[in-house]
Image (tube, rainbow, N blue to C red):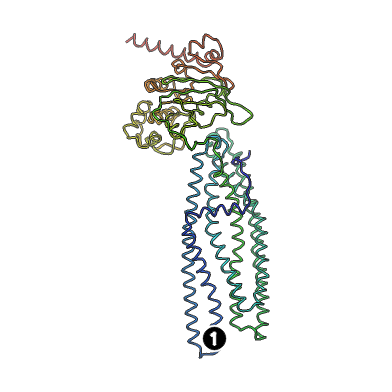
Amino acid sequence: MPYGIPVPCCKKRPVRILLRLLTLLRPYLGATMLASITVVLSSGFALVTPRLVSWAVDFGITRGKSDIRALAVISLAILASAVASGVFRYCYAYLGESTAQRVAYDLREQIYNRLQRLSYAYHDKAQVGQIMSRVTQDVEAVRMYVNQGTLRLADIGVKVIGSLWLIAQLNFHLSIITFIFVPILAGQSVFMSTRLRPYWTRIQDGMGILGTILQENLTAMRVVKAFSREDYESAKFARSAQTLFDDSFHANQIQSFNMPTMIGVWTLSIVITLFYGGHLYLQGQLTIGELAACMLYLQIIQGPMRQVGFIVNQFARSQAAGERIYEILDAESAVKEKPDAVELKDSKGEVIFDRVSFGYDAVSAVLRDVDIVAKPGEIIALLGPTGSGKSTVVNLLPRFYDVTGGRIVIDGHDIRDLTLASLRNSIGIVQQEIFLFIDTIRENIRYGVQGASDEEVIEAAKVARIHDFIMTLPDGYDTWVGERGVTLSGGQKQRISIARMLLRDPRILVFDDSTSSVDMETEYLIQQALNQLMEGRTTFVIAQRLRTVKNADQILVLRNGQIVEQGRHEELLEKNGLYRQIYDVELRDQEEAFAQSTLAANAEVGDS
């Protein structure tokens, strides 16, 4: 099973990705410029030191004790230069890390905000582990690129170019030797980058795969244990971990070979320079101080050239991370808000589906030519076999998906002409899969209306028939809910979710099988509370309970994405069609059970 985020993304050129990452520095241009200046100053003072050493040797040592004063002055100058270089190096390290951390913060926020605004169509295909990997590890790779990559590259450039120029000032012939070896090392680095890039791409993807497997396993731990699949899951994780290990090991092998090669080549340049420099000294064309300065400049160049391998590795990793990050940031949402969208105000709740069609792709249609007219205050019940399109109908209403044909109108407005916030604020939804956050019960109910008072939260809980249960808990409304609400029963989670929706007081209600997880008694209590709430509000219900169906103003029976029957309970029973089949198979038992419970209750009253 492949693990990835299957969004369309054209592979971009590595240089273009790296340049695009640099645009993240635009808000911090001042700090970046200041950091660049401190890089130049730090490297500049470091380059002064070998020349001072040359003067110390030539004027303070070789001329005898009479020049001890000159030696002392030059030594103090060397010390001052080192201190200045260190101070500016600290400044650029501080500024660089501060800027890089801000860029990482901005990038994580951009990714998170983008994920919030992508439609259901994107999240239906995306894996959580892959997204987590991109938000964490890939952003961290970009942070290191911004700081250690770009600024260190500037430091390398100043030191290498400056050293080559200063060697040329001392002796042009010696500088030629250095000029010969620098391109060789640069070519080696480019070659290593080409080899490392595919490895780092696979490593970044492999981390995402590993995260997806881990997240999926932890989420489905009860299923794993119920089917005794621990060994299978361990083996699956081990295979992915082994693949990641192999790619990481091969990448490090390449790097391990690269570093000794570069050191060996550079050592050869030092040997040749020392040999030829000694020859020039013996010929009187070079002083011993100048030769010492040349060797020091070679040492200065050697450090940055060793770091080139790290920089190349960092660039390769950042390019792979950048591609993965921009796959999210460049992803187009299937549901977009128009620039001139208007707000839905004072909604009355009239909903019209006008020849609505929908398909997740161009091949298979989920809905075809669906027509619904729901007047304010009406209850619309949706029934049908699994896969008939019931949930799709209610998911189209708040534009979780966009229709592919026809239109949906609320109070005379095509919902595509409305702002998403105002549209969704007018619709209260209790979804089939209940999700509760790791927080208190109070905050879970208050989630939809953050400014709601405690009294409003309690009132909503009472209407949803969950208040009495909450008060039996040791911490009451301050009781913390476990991950995804695992500490609560299905019915308790359902009622908390209903309370969360009730607090918003919307004009349109959607119950996606919202009472399927509660017993008949609890469902009866909820229904009694909701009957008053539904007055004057348009309500769409996907229900499996007969009581809900019988109270509906319209029952829509769907099959294969089409409405095949429409009417009230008694009318549809008389037609003897699909609704009658559903009633006989699923609803008749409920009616008989309800009748028996009613007779039992009446008998108890009579006895008393």
Residue 268's x, y, as percent? 68, 72
- Residue depicted at 53% across the width and 18% down the height: 557
Residue 293's x, y, as percent? 58, 78
Task: Please name whichever residue, 353 or 46, is drawn nearer the observer in this view of the structure.
Answer: 353
Q: Quadrant of the C terminus?
A: top left
Residue 132's place in the image compared with 48, above or below, is: above
The residue tagged 1 is 59
Q: How many marks?
A: 1
- Residue depicted at 56% across the width and 44% down the height: 330
- The amino acid type, in three-letter code, at marker 1 is Phe
Q: Residues within 10 Å of mark 1 (few under 14, many from 20)?
A: some
| Residue 176 in sight in this render | yes
Task: Please name whichever residue, 242 or 53, is drawn nearer the observer in this view of the structure.
Answer: 53
Give the secondary structure at mark 1: helix
| Residue 510 in sight in this render | no
Left or right, 260 with reference to 21: right
Task: Please name whichever residue, 67 or 110, is drawn nearer the observer in this view of the structure.
Answer: 110
Residue 222's x, y, as percent? 52, 34
Q: Quadrant of the N terminus?
A: top right
- Residue depicted at 51% across the width and 72% down the height: 45
The quadrant holding residue 465 is top left
Residue 606's x, y, as percent? 34, 8
**Residue found at the very far front of the displayed protein:** 340
The quadrant holding residue 306 is bottom right
